Amino acid sequence: MKIEENKVPKTDKVIHFIRQIINQDIADNKNEGRVITRFPPEPNGFLHIGHAKSICLNFGLAQEYGGRCHLRFDDTNPVKEEQKYIDGIIEDVRWLGFDWGEHLYYASDYFEKMYKWAEILIQKGLAFVDSANADQIREWRGTLTQPGKESPDRNRPFGENLDLFRRMRAGEFEDGAYVLRAKIDMAHPNMNMRDPVMYRILKAAHPRTGEDWCIYPMYDWAHGLEDSIEGITHSICTLEFEDHRPLYDWFLDQLGIYHPQQIEFARLNLNYTVMSKRKLLQLVQNRIVDGWDDPRMPTISGLRRRGYTPEAIRDFAERIGVAKRESMVDIGLLEHCLREDLNKRAPRVMGVLKPLKITITNYPEDQVEWLEAVNNPEDESAGVRKVPFSREIYIEQDDFMEIPPKGYHRLSLGSEVRLRYAYYITCNQVVKDKNTGEICELLCTFDPESRGGYTADGRKVKGTIHWVSVPHAVDAEIRLYSSLLIVADPDAEKEEREFIDYIDPDSLQILNHCKLEPSLKDAPAGYFCQFERKGYFCVDRDSVRCGYPVFNRTVELRDSWAKMQPSNNAVL
RNA sequence: UGGGGUGUGGUCCAACGGCAGGACACUUGACUCUGGAUCAAGUUAUUGGGGUUCGAAUCCCUGCACCCCAGCCA
């Protein structure tokens, strides 16, 4: 049937292949037009930006098509799963902005049902209890090019299978003594179809079912059943499960129960970062990072702490698209989405990261002026605030050069520059440390006629720099982050080295005694803003513990000046 | 050397027999009290070879490259 335009939602989004499939299903009136998806994490780790792609896809599709998306924990392996991961995942999905209503499920809630279905398969002669050990099963499975061989237990009478399976459940056997296997085809070219294991004995406490069970279902057996029970229409997963689809289909067909459609798409890869749970865990355990929510981590909790917004992540997920080809997305796109969101919303403030003191010699000694500053030029409703100005101020070390290169718009000896929202100043003298020769102070004069940053004569001042009044400055710690990896893709490197060898030891830089304008004194954890000309920053939760503000640099502003400087190219 | 997938600018995604388009990145210019933002312009692509067709990224044949599968993980 042709797709009828009026039945599918209007959208300016890309109609990727999954939307096409759904549109076709709706046109065919498959599932009476329902769209029910699910996000099925295993609670054995924290979520990362790759999961966010899947979350946005599944929940997003459900929203677009007026359906629903279930949050389902695929908790079928108690030896790896923990309650803390369940809690963390719930928090992260919610933070991303998605709501599953009452549709929070656990695979473990279906264990009894699954067990009954397993007995049915045994009764149909389609499953058997195998006493072979793991090594034997592996050996008899054959190889990619050679067929496997049938287990001697394969033709066990069904009564015996049933009895053994019941005793497996009853806890009569030790781990590994028996498994339940599907009886399919040991010569099948698809390895997954060579009598796959359905249940194994695992005498482990389960975070939810405790000691109720000592046999646990394998993914291939369990997943389709979970989808079927919940009435999932489109079961979306990643590419590596493509080979498993025939088995997914087989179980459902043999049981004759409702059969959702499995659809596979390519997982997200991001350059300059690592994405697998294993590698992320390695970073945490080796204390290369501060924990799962270290702001350098691509975990949802890490991104959140870094200052990423859910809006930016959702926008990113939409922009990268959905397809079947494996790809490597540029981290620059994520940062672009972030800047675009923050540009609209982040209040502007002034903060000096690496202070250089200026004394304005012709400014009255005890005078303080509160000058008006715009909070957000992109958002008039953000209003204005007053910032104190005095005889002594800090500017950024980078904003002064004794001998400026060509094209330098900032302050230099003898040149005039605008202090944002304040005055024009001219540098007259450089004070240096007698021993080291380092610049420690600048003596400048200001033009009283330029109050607010304009003069009546309308003369052009090319450079505008930010500043903070010395007596009013709030001391802060600022944490600067760069990529964890020094190469875009460790796996693509010629040398056979571990990703850990490509870790940048200097990806975290801590700046102390940074100087912020006084409005930031009591900014609460999570508060985000733009330090003008520097980037977007947010207050870290460590602020509370430290007793002074601690800011994370979320992302730098684009800097076309820095890009022109050859010395900086190496850093990029 | 079995099976399952995938090949479009630097990167990601479109185009589903009819002018290869968008986003990011990059370059240039304009504007600017953030070297930000904004605006304008521009560079760069269909895996090779054959075939069908008036016409092929798209259909057919045949190579090549890359990814996944031999857990009692998911």
Image: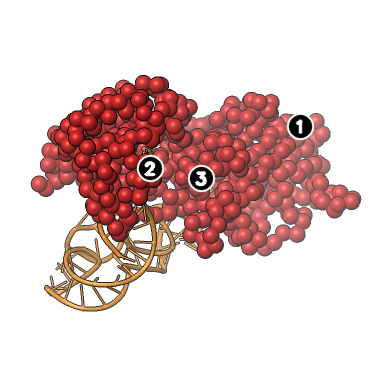
Tag in front: 1 or 3 = 3
Looking at this rendering, what residue extends furthest in the right direction? A434
Circle 3 SS class? helix
Q: Read off the chain for label 1.
A: A
Specify which label sits upstream in the sequence, 1 or 3: 3
The picture places residue B6, in percent across and down from the top left corner, at: 30, 58
Image hue for chain B:
orange
Specify which label sits upstream in the sequence, 3 or 2: 2
Q: Which residue: 77% across, 56% down? A: A402
| Residue matched to label 2 | A134
| Residue matched to label 1 | A471
Q: How many marks?
A: 3
The picture places residue B44, in percent across and down from the top left corner, at: 40, 68
Chain coloured red in this rendering: A
The circle drawn on residue A279 is 3
Circle 2 SS class? helix
Tag in front: 2 or 1 = 2
* Way the structure is coloured: by chain
Specify which label sits upstream in the sequence, 2 or 1: 2
What kind of residue is marked 2?
A: Ala
Question: From this viewpoint, is residue A272 visible?
Answer: yes
